[in-house]
Image (tube, rainbow, N blue to C red):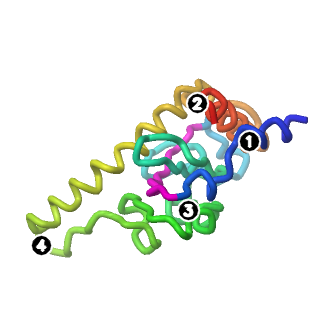
Amino acid sequence: MVEKVLATHVPDPTEASAGRIVLVDGTLVTTWDWSSEGTTMFSGKHRDTGFNLQIAATLAGDLLAVSAPVPGSRHDMHAWRQSHFPEAFAEREGIGDLGYAGSRLFTPRRKPPGQERSAGDKRANRSVNTLRAAVERAIAHLKNWKILATRYRGPLTRFPDIVKTVTALTFYTRGW
């Protein structure tokens, strides 16, 4: 019954993104230290344990999709490949941060080794990051749900269902 309710409130990412530019970013949802369980939840970047979620949004900051959780020790590109996003957004223009370099997403320009960025690269990166602010807002709105904003203390096996439920409730409150 719960799966049927969730399915009715979560739009298909391919249909929801039709004719839109897709913004993608990852976020860490913290859990308490499960190292004694033998998991690989520790994120060196954030110096904390948790799950990496991939979030897709529109240029207006509207949520399009949330991926299944990946252990926090994995970087954004790995989580991107593990998600259904590459197939769902294959026909769309996409923008990501430097963590998605090598994907088909448009990313800012890297600094050349041993050199400074040119003025044109700085302007281009500023433009890309201005657009990417919308996905950061979508992540912030998703983390308005306390269970994603605070340290998750429940069983790790239940976390994917919690993410699905929060995603469905988010779409429901937005009137999808």
Query: Which numbered disc, 3 or 4, marks the residue closer to the eye?
Result: 3
Residue beneath the point at 41% across and 42% down: 60
Position of residue 10 in the picture relative to residue 103 (left or right): right
Residue at the disc numbered 3: 80
Q: Quadrant of the C terminus?
A: top right
The picture places residue 123, in percent across and down from the top left corner, at 15, 59
Magenta stretch, main secondary structure, is strand
Q: Any mark on residue 156, and which? A: 1
How many marks overall?
A: 4
Magenta region: which residues? 19-30
Q: Any mark on residue 174, and which? A: 2
Element type at marker 4? Answer: loop
The picture places residue 103, in percent across and down from the top left corner, at 46, 72
Q: Earlier in the sequence, mark 2 or mark 1?
A: 1
Query: Which numbered disc, 4 or 2, marks the residue closer to the eye?
Result: 2
Are the residues tagged 3 and 4 within 8 Å (C-beta)? no
Q: CA distance from mark 2 to mark 3?
A: 25 Å
